[in-house]
Image (cartoon, rainbow, N blue to C red):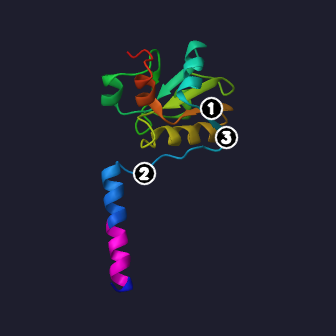
């Protein structure tokens, strides 16, 4: 194989991998926030910390963490709306549909840029919450 053929083959293999894997993974960490796992999130839930679900309406309607607030990151997510839910120094958890969902990373980045200081990034999101046997509404 010549070099051009090898590059094309690698491109196709990479494209197929991304297509079948469901896309790109969200970042493991977001500057200014703390990435939390399901065990840590469960403790935060028990302490009645605010949870912000940034998924699409249809995902929200299909099930969510009890008493979470819904702010679709692509529709209704703004500093003004977030400030009606939590103060800038309150602990707040953002989640979406797992590591292949970029919505929570985007929301976390925005919240940090708006001056929120105690932001938790639940990267594994709703799928890990549900599979851990936690309550769902």
Which of the two residues, 61 or 6, is positioned nearer the viewer here?
6
Which residue is painted at 40% across and 33% down in the image? 55
The residue beneath circle 3 is 32
Instruction: Answer above or below: position of 8 versus 73.
Output: below
Kindly tell me whether residue 83 is visible in this rendering: no
| Cα distance between the residues tagged 3 and 1 | 7 Å
**Picture layout, residue 66 above or below residue 71:** above
Alpha-carbon distance for marks 2 and 1? Answer: 23 Å
Dot 3 or dot 1: first in sequence order is 3
Predominant secondary structure, magenta span: helix
Image side of residue 41 versus residue 68, left or right: right
- Point out the residue furthest to the front here: 1
Q: Name the secondary structure under disc 1.
A: strand
**Pointer 3 or 2: first along the chain:** 2
Q: Earlier in the sequence, mark 2 or mark 1?
A: 2
Chain part drawn in magenta: 4-12
| Quadrant of res 33 | top right
* Quadrant of image for the N terminus: bottom left
Q: Residue at x 39, y 17 (%)?
A: 136
Residue 4's disc is: none
- The residue to which callout 2 is attached is 24
Q: Is residue 11 visible to the viewer in this orientation of the structure?
A: yes
Count of numbered circles on the image = 3
Is the Cβ of the residue at disc 3 closer than 8 Å to that at disc 1? yes
Residue beneath disc 1: 119
In the image, 105: left or right of 47?
A: left
């Amino acid at each position: 194989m010549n070099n051009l053929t090898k590059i094309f083959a690698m491109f196709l293999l990479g494209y197929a991998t991304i297509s079948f894997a469901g896309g790109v993974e969200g970042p493991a960490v977001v500057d200014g926030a703390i990435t939390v796992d399901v065990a840590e999130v469960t403790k935060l839930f028990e302490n009645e910390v605010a949870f912000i679900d940034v998924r699409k309406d249809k995902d929200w309607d299909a099930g969510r963490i009890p008493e979470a607030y819904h702010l679709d990151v692509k529709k209704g997510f703004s500093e003004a709306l977030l400030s009606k839910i939590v103060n800038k120094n309150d602990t707040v958890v953002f989640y979406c549909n797992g590591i292949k969902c970029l919505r929570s990373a985007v929301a976390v980045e925005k919240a940090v840029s708006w001056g929120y200081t105690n932001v938790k990034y639940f990267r594994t999101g709703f799928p890990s919450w549900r599979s851990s046997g936690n309550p769902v509404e």
